[in-house]
Image (tube, helix red, strand yellow):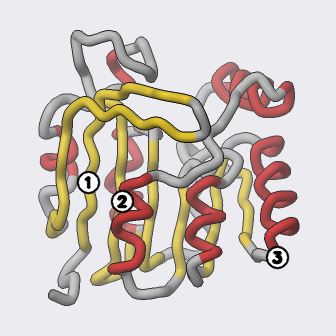
Amino acid sequence: MSDKEKSDWEERYSSGSYKARPWPSDLLEEWLPRMPKGRALDIPSGTGRNALYMAENGFEVDAVDISGSALEILNESARERGLRIRCHEIDLDQGSPPEPPYQLLVSCFFLNRNIIPRMKEWVADNGFIVFEQHMVTPLEVHGPSTQQWRVQPNELLRLFADFRVVHYEEGIFTHQRDGAERTNALARLVACKGEPGY
């Protein structure tokens, strides 16, 4: 990530201009009960909506983000809830999580195709990855305007062809929580690095 991108994210979180969703990914909510407890990695964690949810459900969580301010917010939320989450300020272009592998890796709305091969290495044998990303569409939807930050149709299937895909969907999704409604074009994948146990 460039210095400018890092500075921009830090400014968004430190100023409060970036309003992160407080609720976890509904894809993660749906699939987490089916997964064996273990060590989990959330990248990028932001202020921790997914990290907090995994910790509340018995996972030992490492949270990685480029923004120290986002991780401070996450740490405070974890303390308020009586949770222990290990936070790491890391630029994944240049570094890696401290102690892979993980039984579960969650990546929502973060697309860096160059590090996906490394991400797969961070997943333990028979571990899972939950990956959710904006998808290319001609429709007016929420999310990045730059097409390079959106996946092509079926791109996630190609990127994770060496994993066992246990769930995949793409399309237009409308979410409404806490009075806010968002319509997104999304590709959503759950895959196992080996045998999922069924």
Would you say 13 lies left or right of 175 here? right
Between 37 and 43, the one lying in front of the other is 37
Sequence-wise, the earlier of marks 3 and 2 is 3
Q: Which residue is mark 2?
A: 130
Which quadrant: the N terminus? Answer: top right
Q: Which residue is mark 1?
A: 189
Q: Which residue is mark 3?
A: 82
Of circles 1 and 3, which is in front? Answer: 3
Q: Residue at x 44, y 65 (%)?
A: 105
Between 93 and 168, the one lying in front of the other is 168
- In whole angstroms, how far apart are the C-alphas of marks 1 and 2? 6 Å
**SS label for mark 2:** strand
Sequence-wise, the earlier of marks 1 and 3 is 3
Q: Which x, y percent locates residue 43?
A: 54, 53
Sequence-wise, the earlier of marks 1 and 2 is 2
Say which amino acid is labelled 3: Gly
